Structures are given as structure tokens and as C-alpha cells.
Image: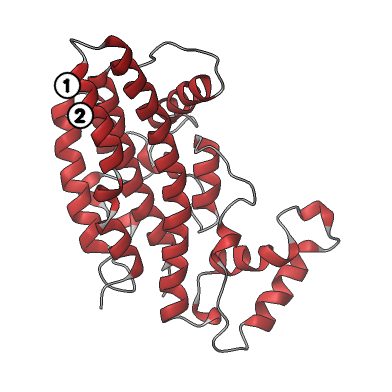
Amino acid sequence: MSTFVFEYVSALDSQWSEVEILLDQAKLVKENNDSLYHALCRSASILMVAHLEGFTKDLSKNIIYDLNSNCNFYQLPMSIKRTACKKYLGFDKSAIPDYDNKIKDMIEDLSKFDGFDICHTAFLFEKNKNPKPDILMEICGRFGASDIFKNLNESIFESAFTSNKRLDRILKRTKKIISMSVNNFPYHCKVSKFKKFKLESKKYNGRTIWQTFLDDLNYNRHNIAHGNTFGNTAEHHELVEKMNKIRLIQYIIVYISCSEAVKGI
């Protein structure tokens, strides 16, 4: 039986269809309807960020569905247990005296019960947050990944920025491997063994090309959505490239988050 995450990953391409429709129409009218062309490009810029934000919510839900369907609380990785308990105590350690010991006690108590389902909302933010690098890092961190961008540093995924041809090749290959990795539970995901893509920590100064890309993506979306600019911030071919990079980072986040979610299971 396939996993919830596998079914979700299988549907990712179809979710991008509305953005692809906008971009296809923009390409058709570029030469004869300048106003419509720019309106379509601006709309696509906003929708792409919305898709990335929605992705973080849906992925978290489906990982938790898989964990609840296959594991008791005591079997879960410690990072998952801690995040699940923080839903009840909150994420501000300074708000509760002896916070860490209270988390520890709650974990011990819940581990005694069979059938306790953890809630996916603990792995999300209470208020909607734009998918900026620090937000993506925090969401993945709640599953146990300390810094997703450290894993991308000097990996093959950085070469996706060298050319569209390279980006397309990496995207297709990544999609295939991730789909195979999450088809069954426990997922066959281990960052330390992802040698084909050289996804491992190297010399890292806290900043990668992926963070710059995401910052620019959110900055352009913000300027359009809040009326800071009424001009077009990206041409059709640039938006197609951005969309494919977002799709690639989605698959990367799936792999890293799933790797942490089944650590030790």
C-alpha cells in the first residue's frame, strides 16, 4: 500500500497546472497584447509563491498521516515527539519554567499509550507565513532537520542554476528518485546515503544560492501583492525557470523531511 506522502508527491505536477496555464497564455499573447502579457506574468509570480506555501502545509499533513497510520508515539523519532508536545506547551521556552523537563515528562507519559495520534498543526505556524528561507528551515527543523540549506551547499542541486537544460535534467531525475523513496513506509530516505546527488554537509558559511533565490521570489511577490510595483518583475521564460526551481526545492524538502521523520524507525 502506497503512503500518503507518495500520493501527495504524485499529485504535485497537476497542482502546478494553473500556473502553467497562465504562463502558456502569456507566451501566446506576448507579441500582440502587452497589457495582458504583463498581467498574466504578475499573476503567475504571486501564485508560484502561494503554491510553495501551500506545499509546506500539505507535506506536513501527509507525513503526520503516515506516522499516525504506522507508528505508536513511543516509536517516533525524538524530534517528532518534542515538536508534537510543543503543540500543548508552546514553542516559547521562556514562557514556562523548567520547560525542557516538562517536555521530557510529557514524552514519557504519552509513550505509555497506544493509539495516540500526533497533530500536524504542531509542525506548522499558527499564522500564515510566506515561504522565506528561515520559515522553510523552521518547518523542516520541526521534523528534525537542523538546516536544510546546509545539505544543499555545494551539492548537485546548486548546478540547477547553471542552465535550463541542467535544471530540467536534475528535476526529472529528482522526481523519479523521490517518488521511489516515499512509496512505502518507512520511507527509504537517508540524507547521509543520498550519494547520487551528493546531498551532504560540506564547507558552509550559512548562505547558499537557494536562499538568495527564495528571498528574491518572496520579494517580488511582496512588491506585486502590496502594490509597491505595477510593472512586470519577470519575463515568461524567467518565470518558467523559477517555477521549475520551486518544483525542485519541493522534492528536496520532501526527501529531507521524510528522512528525518523515519530516523530510527
The amino acid type, in three-letter code, at marker 1 is Leu
Residue 209 makes an appearance in the image: no
Q: Residue at x 24, y 22 (%)?
A: 26
Disc tally is 2
Residue where numbered disc 2 is placed = 24
Answer with the quarter of the image where residue 177 lies: bottom left
Answer with the quarter of the image where residue 246 lies: top left
Q: What SS does tag 1 mark?
A: helix
The amino acid type, in three-letter code, at marker 2 is Asp
Q: Is residue 50 above or below residue 213?
A: below
Residue 106 in the image, given as x and y percentages of width and height = 71, 75
Residue where numbered disc 1 is placed = 28
Q: Give how far apart the Cα atoms at labels 2 and 1 are.
A: 6 Å
Residue 220 in the image, given as x and y percentages of width and height = 46, 21
In the picture, measured across the screen, residue 97 lies left or right of residue 58, that is right
Seen from this angle, which residue lies furthest right? Answer: 97
Given contact means CB atoms under 8 Å apart, are the residues at marks 2 and 1 in contact?
A: yes
Identify the image quadrant of the C terminus: bottom left
